[in-house]
Image (tube, rainbow, N blue to C red):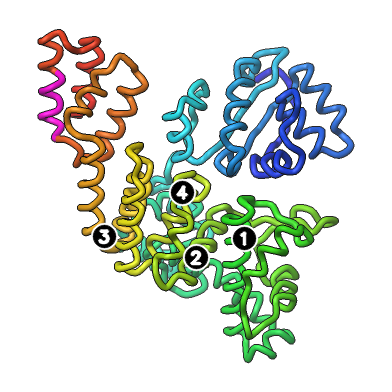
């Protein structure tokens, strides 16, 4: 717009870490709190601009807020009405980002509902072609890559700029592309480690070669990601932090000491997988949250010969911070472990539907990756029907509360096995004719949505 503003970039992961270290601000203002604790030198100026309404506040990755996410979402929702549009003088402007899945989850819990939504669109065929030509040029190699893409039956992997870029990177290295997300993330990490290990060095020699160094380096990164994600619940970590050092005690390897492999990884072995965020305090983070989640899932799966270790995370995985780790881990489990674990999770269902949601996400991930899970699908349908009987669904769809009706409609549409939509719509229309429905208009819309 025509109103000049100074951008203030706030990483939600960093704000979450500051809140854990210093506690919530007394006045509740997280923007001022972030400026005070994170901005050196320009802090007073930015505070003045904030007071004058001359900031463009950019909050990146609310989904990375871990246990502080809800509080952050509540604060920025309260801040939004005080901010104007980009062309409104005298007020700051506010933009936040989060994963789509997390956004829908927040909206279903009446958070972030007042924000105008802008969504990054998936790559179309033209966009994919431009990305491929930019990285591979034109010619036989690019043509071979495109043919490999056509043979894939996983649309999400070719529509995402991030995943497509990873596919190109792996193709450059191996001349072929993985067909599953977890295999893609693994190959990308291994490609980075191989390039670093190819430079040789004393550690590679002591381990018996570059291949062994790559293997040990990957196992260390798995452990590192698990400590950050599952123990510390953070993206940012410092090598000298006591809790971080205690977590790394999980590292058990007879081939290389913790000191040796840690030095190699942080002195260049990890390449772009890790980013240095604070030179003075030796602060780092994984370059992409998905990489951290995959490596944590891989570590969890490698240590689990049965589903016993996964059971330790049953309750936490109902929180979105752990959810993606479990989704990724589910595609690495063998069928017996997956079935046993899923049935255990369903056994924890308390009527809220949260545990059924977790199992459904795991099932859908395995279906997308062409992994079997039919026994679990049947058990999931049976469990969900037991906590959402047909008459209860009819009652909830006819309830005076618009929020309850919307939640029930979403659940019924997502879990098609809950009720026959034709029968359900008929019952709702009958309730209108009998004068039982709260509002005929709302019920008619429900029927239309169910049948669409």
User: Mark 3 sits on what residue?
Assistant: 373
Disc 3 to disc 1, C-alpha distance: 29 Å
- The residue indicated by pointer 1 is 227
Determine which residue is flagged by label 2: 300
User: Is residue 439 found left or right of 46 in the rendered image?
Assistant: left
Asked if 181 appears above or below 439 in the picture, the reply is below
Q: Position of residue 301 (x, y in %)?
A: 46, 67
Question: From mark 4 to mark 2, how far is it between C-alphas?
Answer: 16 Å
Name the spot of residue 366 as percent of width and height, x first.
32, 58
Establish if 346 lies above or below 423: below
Q: Judge left or right: residue 316 versus residue 437.
A: right
Q: Secondary structure at mark 1?
A: helix
Q: Main secondary structure of the magenta part?
A: helix
Say whether disc 3 or disc 1 marks the residue closer to the N-terminus: 1
Instruction: Evaluate whether residue 143 shows in this view.
Output: no
Q: Is residue 280 above or below residue 440?
A: below
Instruction: Determine whether, in the image, residue 4 is placed left or right of residue 98.
Output: right
Residue at 74%, 76% in the rendered image = 259
SS category of the residue bearing label 4: loop
Q: Mark 4 = which residue?
A: 315
352 inside magenta stretch: no
Q: Nearer the viewer, residue 217 or 252?
A: 252
Mark 2 is surrounded, within 10 Å at the Cα level, by few (under 14), some (14 to 19) or many (20 or more) other residues, namely many
Neighbours of disc 3 within 10 Å: few (<14), some (14-19), many (20+):
some
Of residues 323 and 269, which is closer to you in this image?
A: 323
Quarter containing the N terminus: top right
Residue 255's disc is none
Which-is-in-front pick, marks 1 and 4? 4
Mark-to-mark CA distance, 2 and 1: 11 Å
Closer to viewer: mark 4 or mark 2: 4
Q: CA distance from mark 1 to mark 4?
A: 18 Å
Question: Tag 3, which secondary structure?
Answer: loop
């Amino acid at each position: 717009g025509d109103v000049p503003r100074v951008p203030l970039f706030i990483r939600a992961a960093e704000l979450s870490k500051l809140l854990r270290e210093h506690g919530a601000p007394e006045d509740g203002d997280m923007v001022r709190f972030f400026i005070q604790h994170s901005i050196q030198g320009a802090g007073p100026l930015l505070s003045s601009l904030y007071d004058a309404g001359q900031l463009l506040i950019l909050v990146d990755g609310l989904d990375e807020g871990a246990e502080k996410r809800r509080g952050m979402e509540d604060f920025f929702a309260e801040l939004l009405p005080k901010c104007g549009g980009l062309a409104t003088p005298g007020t700051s402007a506010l933009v936040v980002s989060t994963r789509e899945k997390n956004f829908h989850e927040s909206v279903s819990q009446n958070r972030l509902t007042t924000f105008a939504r802008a969504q990054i669109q998936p790559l179309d065929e033209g966009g994919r072609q431009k990305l491929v030509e930019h990285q591979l040029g034109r010619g036989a190699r690019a043509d071979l890559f495109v043919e490999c893409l056509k043979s894939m039956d996983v649309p999400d992997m070719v529509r995402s700029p991030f995943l497509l870029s990873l596919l190109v990177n792996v193709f450059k290295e191996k001349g072929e592309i993985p067909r599953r997300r977890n295999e893609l993330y693994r190959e990308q990490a291994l490609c980075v480690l191989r390039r670093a290990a190819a430079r040789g060095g004393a550690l590679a020699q002591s381990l018996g070669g570059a291949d062994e160094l790559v293997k040990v380096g990957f196992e260390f990164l798995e452990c590192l990601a698990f400590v950050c994600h599952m123990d510390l619940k953070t993206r940012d970590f410092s090598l000298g932090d006591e809790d971080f050092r205690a977590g790394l005690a999980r590292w058990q390897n007879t081939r290389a000491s913790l000191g040796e492999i840690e030095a190699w990884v942080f002195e260049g072995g990890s390449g772009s997988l890790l980013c240095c965020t604070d030179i003075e305090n030796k602060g780092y983070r994984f370059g992409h949250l998905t990489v951290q989640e995959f490596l944590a899932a891989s570590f969890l799966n490698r240590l689990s010969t049965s589903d016993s270790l996964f059971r330790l995370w049953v309750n936490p995985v109902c929180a979105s911070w752990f959810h993606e780790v479990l989704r990724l881990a589910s595609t690495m489990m063998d069928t017996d472990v997956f079935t046993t674990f899923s049935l255990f999770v369903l056994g924890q269902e308390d009527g809220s539907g949260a545990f059924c949601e977790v199992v459904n996400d795991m099932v859908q991930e395995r279906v997308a990756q062409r992994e079997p899970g039919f026994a679990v699908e049947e058990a999931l349908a049976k469990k969900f029907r037991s906590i959402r009987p047909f008459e209860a669904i009819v009652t909830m769809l006819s309830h005076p509360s618009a929020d309850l009706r919307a939640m029930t409609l979403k659940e019924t549409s997502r879990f098609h096995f809950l009720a026959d939509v034709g029968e359900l719509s008929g019952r709702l229309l009958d309730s209108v004719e009998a004068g039982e429905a709260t509002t005929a208009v709302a019920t008619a819309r429900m029927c239309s949505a169910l049948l669409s």
